[in-house]
Amino acid sequence: MPQDHDQTQSLTMTLSKDSFETHKCDPPSLEITVSKEELLRMYMAMVTMRRIETTADTFYKSQLIRGFCHLCTGQEAVGVGLETALTQEDKVITAYRSHGFTYMRKGSILPILAELLGRKNGISGGKGGSMHMFTPNFFGGNGIVGAQVPLGAGIAFAQKYLGRKAATFVFYGDGAANQGQVFEAFNMAKLWGLPAVFVCENNQYGMGTSVERSSASTDYYKRGDYIPGIKVDGMDVLAVHQAIAYARDWALTENKGPLLLEMETYRYGGHSMSDPGVSYRSREEIQKVRAENDPITHLKERLLEHHISTEKELKEMDKAARAEVDKAANEAKESAQPDIETFWTDVYKEGKGVPFLRGREPQETHHYK
Amino acid sequence: MSTTLLRSARLASSLSSISRTFLHQGLPVKHLHTSLKTHYAASGSPPPAEGFLPGVANSQLIKHTHHDALRNPELAGVANGETKKMNTFQAINDAMRIALATDDTACVFGEDVGFGGVFRCTMGLAETFGRDRVFNTPLTEQGIAGFGIGMAAMGSTAIAEIQFADYIFPAFDQIVNEAAKYRYRSGGEFNVGSLCIRTPCGAVGHGGHYHSQSPEAYFAHTPGIKVVVPRGPIQAKGLLLASIRDRNPTIFMEPKILYRAAVEMVPVGDYELPLGKAEILTQGKDLTIVGWGAQLYVLENAIQLAQKKMPGLSVELIDLRSILPWDVETVCNSVNKTGRLLIAHEAPKTQGFAAEIASTVMERCFLRLEAPIQRLCSYDTPFPLVFEKFHVPDMIRCAEGIERAMKF
């Protein structure tokens, strides 16, 4: 990509002083050093992520996707800022608003879109759908609200036990923040000093319920009580990156046990594709966030301000992202349905589970070798 | 696509934009197809190949007229009253309205019930009865159940909603270890009889793992609670009022596919239907079929299919209505008459409730049985998304089961 500055050249930027608020700890530095290449990769990732979600939206409206589909449009900075601060060895687990995370954790676009369409080459073989996507270091993709948090604590425990140099990032939403099992996980993580970073993705609404109406305390970063916490501007990808890097150091390098991050973010779409998203908030509110606080626009402004790129180049990147996703979308639409045999697989470990599963008639049984 | 628009056009005048969106998402392809057939049937097109129109809307079990509805002896108390066209969620709404109006201690709570609920079952209740009686809870099923148990222990009527039956498992401990055992462990000092937990259950066409389950079997294994599953609006209203007023903690499982699909003339008055009592829907002498909830409509179609191959086949179709306690007498009397039994349900086969029915009937009617008891259930896998049509016992599988029972 032709431009004025050397790609590997590093730049030091200052984050807004409103980026962080802390609870029982020091904030990360507001000075962030990042290379041009990294910034452009962040931009490309966010734009691609948004295009994937827009494609999913279109697919759903044409009834190509059935079931449930939860989009992260508007929350791209969280997924991108997370991944750029992690290594491939670190573990991530989240709930069902997971397409963006899957993409960042090395899930390619075609398997993601194919999974949404329930096709054979989907990332879960077409058997999971929107809510259940996994990659080797990404544990999904979980449907039951809050259930992934104790799971995350367990994953963190395994890292510590096995002496792995990996931190576990456990995501949950503002709605899930009131689940009992979340606090059970906090206790275990603190008690046993687990390298777990709990991240509350606060997009202000738990489905149709605003945070004020669901939570006695909306300071989700303080809800860990004995676990120190930081509230982060989740619409600024650099603030997210800085906070995640800080948290990773805290949990892993400095061995200080768990940390709680709250990402203040916003979703433009409804809770899921079944929810228009305007019965519990005004269109003006959504418009306002889009206009004043969009994560992609933020980064774009930074890139232009620091002469890292030009309008023209960024438009080219937009087009490239769009083309890549559209190509995958077309391929996904042409992909084959899963074989009927896969209906029976993965219930148990074959050969070591049950000898057979019953079918429709006494004569019809599916045998495992 | 045009089918969706047809249905939308018919109902547009009475629905808000939100419910129209839910309507688009809530109906399975099978029922959209049915409505298309109905439209064409009305305009004089050739009859369908199977010889009958499948689906809930065309069912003989649905009471389409005032007189049809009131012919039911169980509705004797409201036989002189009015009826109104209601679908299942409207009937459930009506039941809760009556419960709240006749019982000052009654409260309705759960996730998102305040604005009307994700299936519109609680529409208008908060406006009519106040937000101190109809209120939202945070996202916390264990909390909702525990909270409801506490309220009921103090004698208040707690009508709790668990948004989807798939989410009831965090509350499982509260229900099984607290609610079910309260009366027994306190020697009658306390009880939570005024607790009723309502929850949408069952397959919907696109629900996948966590919006389709039928967990009645897990709860049937717990003495101390009652489990009820209605098959349509008239039943839902009467059984829900009975469940709320019954002095035992009750789990009321509403097959979500029926919320819009089943529309009947429902008595507007205050009436209850008996818990623990099954209903014989059609009398017969050759075969007894037991089902509950939405599966009954599948069974109705399966019987119609089977009757084409075996003309004159006379089937006794029974709606179990209460899973716990279940009406052993009615089922066994029927099997003693017919000698053959088939049970169908959407939950997986192993340890599904059909297993309990089959065991009891085997014990009681062993020498009368002419054929092995047929259980038509879902396969033993997690509830799939793309494979749903293969997973559930559809009318063809059930018809095959009927054939097996008859030709043994």
Image (cartoon, grey):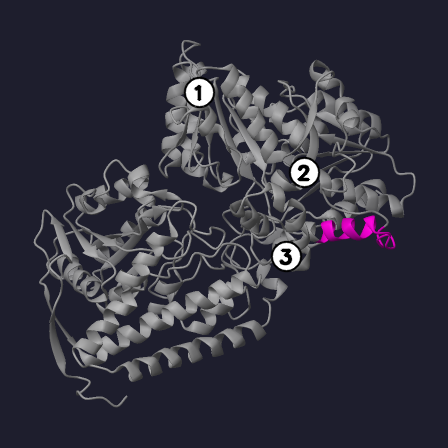
Q: Give the residue type that dot 1 points to.
A: Lys
Mark 1 and mark 3 in contact? Answer it, CB < 8 Å: no
- Rendered position, A71 above or below B114: below
Task: Say few, some or many: other residues with alpha carbon within 10 Å of mark 2 (under 14 / 14 to 19 / 20 or more).
Answer: many
- Rendered position, A17 above or below A173: below
In the picture, the disc for residue A366 is: 3
Q: Is residue A206 left or right of residue A250?
A: right
Nearest to the observer: residue B367 or residue A170: A170
* Percent coordinates x, y for residue A214 in the rendering: 32, 38
Q: Give the residue type that dot 3 points to.
A: His
Q: For the residues tagged 3 and 2, is the chain the same?
A: no
* Percent coordinates x, y for residue A268 in the rendering: 37, 57
What is the quadrant of the C terminus of chain A in the image?
bottom right
Say what secondary structure mark 2 lies in. Answer: loop
> Which residue is at 30% across, 84% downward?
A312
Give the residue at mark 2: B262
In the picture, the disc for residue B181 is: 1
Nearest to the observer: residue A337 or residue A173: A173
* Magenta region: B33-50
Comparing labels 1 and 3, the label whose residue is closer to the camera: 1
Q: Residue furthest right?
A: B312
* Percent coordinates x, y for residue B232 in the rendering: 66, 33
